[in-house]
Image (spheres, grey):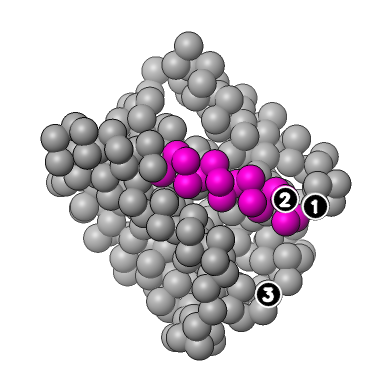
């Protein structure tokens, strides 16, 4: 049952990320953390999100604008080790509370569409990249910071998708280099790999056929629910 749930969650997250450029971790990370524990759950989120980014870039690479993405990646490189250190040293209950709180707050912030002058230009890229790197390594959730930066800079969906995939590939590779790969069983790896492939293919087929606004609302609602459940588990675990 656990392997089946893992596969279903990864498939759903992969489809959403292929459609929108981000969203895998918001949907999948809280459930993976509950199934596998914080270390392996976040690690699998990093692996799957990075793999989805590779597949997405294979189709969208012509839209990559390195000048826009490199500042985000460089800033993330500074903070990923800090996030990895936090993930390695914090007690499990603290990590559950932190991951649940981050996912919940990020979902609400993105829902509200926060606008701020500080989230534009090079300073905004540095702040968003640094936040994304820290949160991706520690909690598997680096996308919302980049989403907010892109929204404040006025990126179109067509501009955002390939550049978000490039950032996702880079930051997840850095996170896995800092922490190592999760310790999963062969059935878990097989389920996750198959789900990434199937979900990415489904997202590609559905691209352009699902209105953006309803999809966005559904993703954020699911993310908020998962975040609150994880937060509650951390609090009841003795934090």
The x and y percentages for residue 121 are 53, 87
Choose between 56 and 96: the one closer to the eye: 96
Q: Nearer the viewer, mark 3 or mark 1?
A: 1
Which residue is denoted by mark 3 in the rendering? Answer: 155
Disc sitting over residue 214 in the figure: 2
- All told, the count of numbered labels is 3
Residue 34 visible, this angle: yes
Residue 109 vertical placement versus 187 (above, below): below
The x and y percentages for residue 84 are 27, 52
Q: Earlier in the sequence, mark 3 or mark 1?
A: 3
The magenta span reads 212-227
Q: Is residue 219 magenta?
A: yes
Circle 2 packing at 10 Å, graded few (<14), some (14-19), many (20+), is few
Q: CA distance from mark 3 to mark 2?
A: 20 Å
* Residue sitting at x 50%, y 45%: 223
Find out whether the residues at labels 2 and 1 contact each other: C-beta distance under 8 Å: yes
Local SS, label 1 = loop
Which residue is denoted by mark 1 in the rendering? Answer: 211
Find out whether the residues at labels 3 and 2 contact each other: C-beta distance under 8 Å: no
The x and y percentages for residue 109 are 48, 64
Which SS does the magenta portion mostly show?
Answer: helix
């Amino acid at each position: 049952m656990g392997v089946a749930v893992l596969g279903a969650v990864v498939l759903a997250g992969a489809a959403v990320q292929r459609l929108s450029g981000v969203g895998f971790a918001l949907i999948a990370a809280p459930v993976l953390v509950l199934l596998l524990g914080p270390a392996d759950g976040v690690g699998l989120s990093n692996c799957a999100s990075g793999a989805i980014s590779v597949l997405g870039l294979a189709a969208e690479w012509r839209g990559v604008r390195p000048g826009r993405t490199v500042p985000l990646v460089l800033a993330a490189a500074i903070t990923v080790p800090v996030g990895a250190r936090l993930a390695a040293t914090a007690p499990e209950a603290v990590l559950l509370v932190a991951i649940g709180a981050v996912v919940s707050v990020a979902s609400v912030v993105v829902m509200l569409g926060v606008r701020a002058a500080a989230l534009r230009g090079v300073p905004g890229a540095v702040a968003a990249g640094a936040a994304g790197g820290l949160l991706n390594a520690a909690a598997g959730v680096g996308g919302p910071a980049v989403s907010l930066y892109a929204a404040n800079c006025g990126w179109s969906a067509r501009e955002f998708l390939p550049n978000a995939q490039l950032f996702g590939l880079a930051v997840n590779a850095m996170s896995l280099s800092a922490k190592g790969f999760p310790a999963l069983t062969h059935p878990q790896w097989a389920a996750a790999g198959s789900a990434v492939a199937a979900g990415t293919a489904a997202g590609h087929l559905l691209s352009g056929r699902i209105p953006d606004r309803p999809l966005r609302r559904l993703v954020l609602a699911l993310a908020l629910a998962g975040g609150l459940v994880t937060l509650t588990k951390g609090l009841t675990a003795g934090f």
